[in-house]
Amino acid sequence: MFRTAEGHRSQRNSTRRGPRGRSGLRATACAAAAAGMFLAVGCSSSGDSGPGEAAGGVPVVQKGKLTTCTHLPYPPFQFEQNGKVVGFDVALIDLVAQNLKVEQKILDTPFENFKTGAFLNSGQCDLAAAGMTITDERKKNVDFSVPYFDATQALLATKKSGITSLADVKAKSAKLGAQAETTGESYAKSQGFNPVAFESSDAVLNGLRTGQVDAVVIDYPVVQGWLKDKANASAFVLGQNIETGEKYGFSVKKGNSALLAAIDMAITAAKADGTYKKIYEQWIGPLPQAAS
């Protein structure tokens, strides 16, 4: 299932069973079926639905748009706020869209599609931006931009559990959760755990709140965002920080060198002129010196 929005998008999911812009959002709905699998919502009213070229001859799947596949919600990288999808990833891709003289359009898609590049290969999206770790396995199916974010994992547990580390989880035979198809899930499995897999970060948090799990492993910036909420801060405790050496990248269809170059150029320029620092501090917090 996917939903579309002019520069913005949204989707809510439940526990997974098995392995995992610009302003001007329109909430108008139009239904369409694709192979009986997808439902389109918030369709564009522009009438320009065919492929085109952006500035510099960069091909795009829809004229006048830079179509981004992502998976909501995943704050602070992409999430819905006051009817718009915003966040760190959204702001960075807006820079690319501005350089290409087009408008960013966002599709909300299942996270597992980012591993295979399915929506990129089918021509539904130009790129994927979803707080996605660059891995050798994923490189087999997509091309990645230069890294735009250095990430770590964190353990978050209920205060009543008394858990502050993965060793505690094991010692107490507690239930561990993670978002499906993510580095957090992979890391937990590599440490001998069989985590409960949730489809989205919202579902991970809900699983912790409702007692489905006692602790979760997830990206540290996501935990930072959760703990800004007083109710979460009073109920949960931040445990160990887990260094995995992971870096996030935006992905494009294999061989799409023109768009990849445009993305790399935007990231590099933003880091050089201070724009990256401003965006980082707006959505995440103080910029570590090594990331500037």
Image (spheres, rainbow, N blue to C red):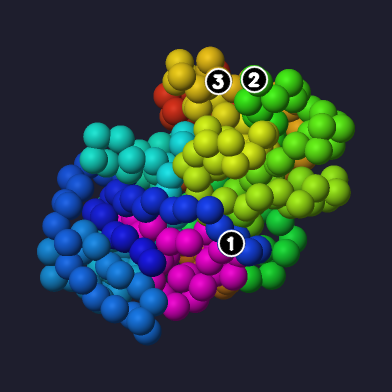
Q: Is residue 180 left or right of residue 50?
A: right
For the residues labelled 3 and 2, say whether their Cβ atoms are less than 8 Å apart: yes
Corner quadrant of residue 243: top right
Q: Which mark is residue 235?
A: 3
Query: Between marks 1 and 2, how big is the CA–CA gap?
Result: 27 Å
Q: How many marks?
A: 3
- Earlier sequence position, callout 1 versus callout 2: 1
Q: Quadrant of the N terminus?
A: bottom left
In the figure, 136 relative to 84: above or below?
below
Query: Between marks 3 and 1, how big is the CA–CA gap?
Result: 26 Å
SS state under label 2: helix
Q: Which residues are magenta?
A: 104-126
Q: Which mark is residue 87?
A: none
Q: Residue at x 69, y 31 (%)?
A: 155
Foreground of the two, 247 or 270: 247
Residue type at mark 1: give it.
Answer: Arg
Query: Can residue 271 be seen in the rendering of this structure?
Result: no
Judging by the rendered image, the residue that carries numbered circle 2 is: 159
In x, y percent, where is residue 131? 55, 46
Please tell me how crowded label 2 is: few (under 14), some (14-19), or many (20+) other residues with Cα within 10 Å: some
Residue type at mark 3: give it.
Answer: Ala
SS state under label 1: loop
Q: Which mark is residue 17?
A: 1
Q: Is residue 68 left or right of residue 207?
A: left
- Earlier sequence position, callout 3 versus callout 2: 2
Q: Residue at x 30, y 35 (%)?
A: 81
Q: Residue at x 16, y 51 (%)?
A: 26
**Residue reaching furthest bottom?**
35
- Earlier sequence position, callout 3 versus callout 1: 1
SS state under label 3: helix
Residue type at mark 2: give it.
Answer: Lys
| Magenta highlight on residue 259 | no
